[in-house]
Amino acid sequence: MKHENKTTNFRSRLEELVGNEKPFPWASKIGLTPGVFNRMWNDGTAPKGDVLQLIAGKTGCSLDWLLLGEGEKWRPELCQVVPVKDIMLNGFDMRAEGYVNVPSLDTSISTEGLINQNEQVVDYIGFNEDWIKKFLGVSAENLLLIRVKGDSMVPTLSEGDLVLIDTTSKNIVTNSMYVVQFWGSLQIKRVQCKLDGTVVIKSDNNIYEPEIIPIDQVDNLNVIGRVVWYGKRP
């Protein structure tokens, strides 16, 4: 009887990690050489242990999931939910060593443009500080977490997912995801700046048409921040 090779779907798991980014720039960002990544991406070949360790360390995925497709995708030690009452006492921060606590706001950003305006910190998510610095390359002090509503960014984002926003990243990098405010409504969308000065707001769900903001209305587009990480609802 022929035994199933559990590394057969390694390429599909690699695609999950790359997401909607361009594959080779993504590989360069986490420190993979073009030759090594080419063998993984084009041939579907699982790399050696040191490369697997690099990918897991930079992305936060587990080695068992990456190589064999077994267990949880994300390593639990990189992200933990910490209720406010457990980390705040008389104004003193009691965060665990090696973690930074990012505020999660009571604001549901809709991918369809609706929002609950009741903005307040309801809890904190503890993120591994070293992971934020090495992989995200941002300052934890400028991060916010907001929960997603709607389906216009499916399959990338779904109802109930958490998005991590870098509020200092307001310069548009074409095709990245941003939280933007336009005429009062907050949305998570991909943003593309055109050479003619117009801005295109795009959904990942193909049933939604792109919105084109003309030059004379671009000043009404407020970029809240760039999405630097998202956590899928279990």
Image (spheres, rainbow, N blue to C red):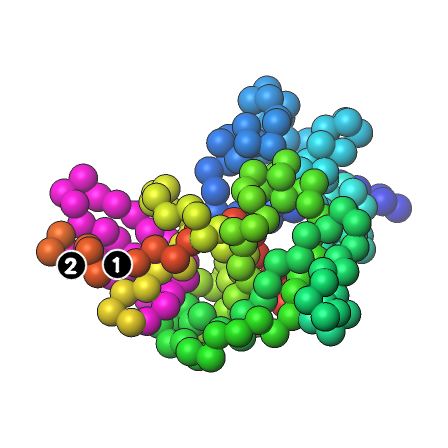
Q: Residue 95 falls in which quadrant of the image?
A: bottom right
Q: Is residue 31 left or right of residue 191?
A: right
Residue found at x 18% / y 50%: 198
Residue 144 vs residue 86: left or right? left
The answer to whether 82 is drawn above or below residue 134 in the figure is below
- Distance, label 1 to label 2, CA atoms, is 7 Å
Determine if the magenta segment contains residue 186: yes
The residue drawn where x is 54% and y is 54% is 143
Query: Does residue 195 show up?
Result: yes
The reply to whether the C-beta atoms of the residues labelled 1 and 2 are less than 8 Å apart is yes
Q: Can residue 65 be seen from the camera position used here?
A: no
Residue at 52% over, 51% down: 142
Find residue 113 and name its label: none
Identity, as a three-letter code, of the amino acid under mark 1? Leu
- Residue at screen point 56% across, 38% down: 137
Q: Is residue 158 above or below residue 204?
A: below
Q: Residue 196 is drawn in which quadrant?
A: top left
Q: Nearer the viewer, residue 177 or 65?
A: 177
Q: Nearer the viewer, residue 7 or 35?
A: 35
Query: Local crowd at mark 2 within 10 Å, few (<14), some, or many (≥20)?
Result: few
| Residue 5 is one of the magenta-drawn residues | no
Give the class, few, some or many, for how many residues have Cα within 10 Å of label 1's Cα (few <14, many ≥20): some
Front-most of 234 and 48?
234
Residue wearing tag 2: 217
Location of residue 42 in the rendering, given as x and y in whole percent from the top left corner: 57, 31
Q: What SS does tag 2 mark?
A: helix
Q: Amino acid at mark 2?
A: Gln
The segment highlighted magenta reads 185-214
Residue 165, horizontal then vertical, whole percent: 50, 55
| Residue corresponding to mark 1 | 221
